[in-house]
Amino acid sequence: MCGLLGFLTPADGASGDSFDEVVHQVYEALQCGRHRGPDERGTWHDERIILGFNRLSIIDIEHSHQPLRWGPPENPERYALAFNGEIYNYLELREQLTAEHGARFRTEGDGESIVAAYHHWGTEAFSRLRGMYAFAIWDTETQRLVIARDRFGIKPLFLATGPGGTAYASEKKSLLELLPALGLSDALDVRAIEHYTVLQYVPEPESLHADVRRLESGCYATLGPGEKPAVTRYFEPKFQVRPFQPGSADARYHEIAEVLRDSVAKHMRADVTVGAFLSGGIDSTATAALAIQHNPNLLTFTSSFEREGYSEADVAAETAAAIGAKHYIRTVTPEEYAAAIPEIVWYLDDPVADPALVPLYFVAKEARKHVKVVLSGEGADELFGGYTIYREPLSLKPFEYLPGGVRRLAGKLSDRIPEGTRGKSLLHRGSLPLEQRYYGNARSFGDAQLRAVLRDFRPEWTHQDVTAPIYARSRGWDPVARMQHLDLFTWLRGDILVKADKMTMANSLELRVPFLDPEVFAVAERLPFDQKITKETTKYALRRALAEIVPPHVLHRPKLGFPVPLRHWLRGPELYDWAATQIAESQTDHLLHKAAVKAMLEAHRTGEVDHSRRLWTVLIFMIWHGIFVEDRIKPAIEQPTYPVRL
């Protein structure tokens, strides 16, 4: 596990003092990602490329230093690898590569399995990796660079290409340090700002800086000096539904349970202690219950708030006792919550307006006192149908029998019904096709509200910029499968996995997600509609599969996650004054109508309407702008100490 930073020269190369200066800049820019790898920091370079890393040692702590050199016997240092993540089937890959190709390995780590697989199988090797990763492989013979991300986007990777070359990084803030050397600017992308405001996260491949993009999940890119990255998608998730045959249900539930057992077992591979996050839901409980079979001394962690109705700490503690784990609870006060936000936004790189980021940050900080790795339940909802919104096709099914003209009329009628009237939303959404009504779990501003807040509002920049190409790939699927597929490319990789990675790495803690395993997905993608969603519940098949694994008090509980009393705090003394101060001091007048934002805050305070999510979206952007653009807000970031290896 480490933070990556690399620089590939332009076609005419770089030499002498200018190249030495870039080497120095890369080394200095690594400081921005020091939290990703407090155990070791360094660079390696030849005349064309500079590879930098910050290492958090998990497997083969003594020997798997990076960048890692590997090659066949005739050229044993042909490749240089910089690798962020974990390959959970690396032992099986090493065995297969040794048996089939006589591959030789010098360490006990997982990094060599990536390079050896690439050498013998080419880019097809990426489809054989079970793990989370972002890595770069430099071939000293061909002078070619390949960079890749895991299937679901668990680990981040930013890219920038200009006349001065190409750079990539785990942390965008490190990449921003290199923009001048690349001949690029730090101008903002106003279209990405509008997408963020609608979605509450910045969708891939965008970032809020126009000259910085992200390599998308499930993709790799190849390039040589002076070339632009050529991106190829190697993983396209497809929900290939197979209806249950008579008498096959129990076998399928058993198959789900067994593939989860195998995934958790492989995710427990480490040379350090592995713990688990534990909320009150089925996903994290299943992960912890399976993990404790491999580590009887498992430690579990959860967060809570003192406000009633916004804590699952009691349920989590009951669950920990039921499975036999030692449990830790981190209670977060409103004062701590507000004070931590600038630091959290700095770690994020791009804003994510998810209030659950903050309790996740604090529970990760608590966990890091005891362990170096934690398991968590992210991904189960997208794979097995866990969001309540996935049940919407059931309630809207009667609309499918109406002629198109009648549905359009229903939509016009809904526009005349006063806000807050029962049935208005159902009528409006029933009049729309899935592609228009569903754009993921994040819903914030409507067009009229956006126009009031954004100075550069463009009605043609809609969520469909992001969703239309994704929906095009799922045409003909059932509506729940299409919603799941959309969420894999939007909400999961834009919000859920960003906050999971950024908040744990902020505390030099590695988070692993056993549900987001290719073998688990291979089982989940075959589940029919009625095994995911029913009128009574979500994740039906998963609940049936886990009936003998999770305690009964958890099996049918609704999902809460890390709920935050944001609606109440923004109305009261906890966060109202803080929010008003952020609005007043922000220098975003050229981007936002601050008077409209202030009016939203006042309307929320008086209880006229719940603007909490919209306000939070704008406030997080203002703080991001204050840090990365204005240089007005300067979070106090802890600086770990570690040995340096050049």
Image (cartoon, helix red, strand yellow):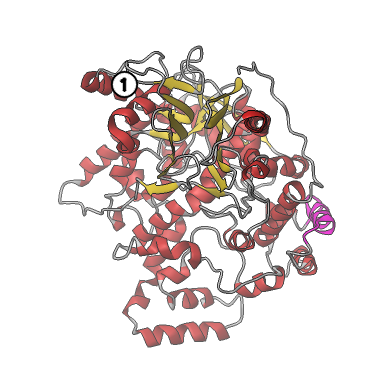
Q: Position of residue 72 (x, y in %)?
A: 33, 19
Q: Is residue 507 in view from this perspective?
A: no
Give left or right: position of 74 versus 67.
Answer: left
Task: Please state which of residues 199 and 184 is positioned toward the viewer in this rendering.
Answer: 184
Give left or right: position of 434 versus 587.
Answer: left
Task: Please state which of residues 249 and 352 is positioned toward the viewer in this rendering.
Answer: 352
Task: Please state which of residues 307 and 197 is positioned toward the viewer in this rendering.
Answer: 197
Q: Is residue 175 in view from this perspective?
A: yes
- Confirm whether the magenta stretch covers residue 197: no
Q: How many marks on residues?
A: 1
- Residue at figure coordinates x 57%, y 54% from the top left: 202
* Amino acid, disc 1: Arg
Q: Is residue 97 above or below residue 424?
A: above
- Confirm whether the magenta stretch covers residue 581: yes
Residue at image mark 1? 94
Give left or right: position of 116 versus 459.
Answer: left
- Residue at figure coordinates x 68%, y 69% from the top left: 456
Residue at far left of view: 246
Q: Position of residue 536 (x, y in %)?
A: 39, 57
Q: Position of residue 567 (x, y in %)?
A: 69, 57
Task: Please state which of residues 484 and 393 is positioned toward the viewer in this rendering.
Answer: 484
Q: Is residue 335 above or below residue 325?
A: below
Q: Which residues are magenta?
A: 572-588
Q: Secondary structure at mark 1?
A: helix
Quarter of the image that includes the C terminus: top right
Give left or right: position of 614 versus 404.
Answer: right
Tag 1: Cα neighbours inside 10 Å, few (<14), some, or many (≥20)?
Answer: many
- Quadrant of the rendered image containing residue 45: top right
Q: Position of residue 259 (x, y in %)?
A: 30, 35
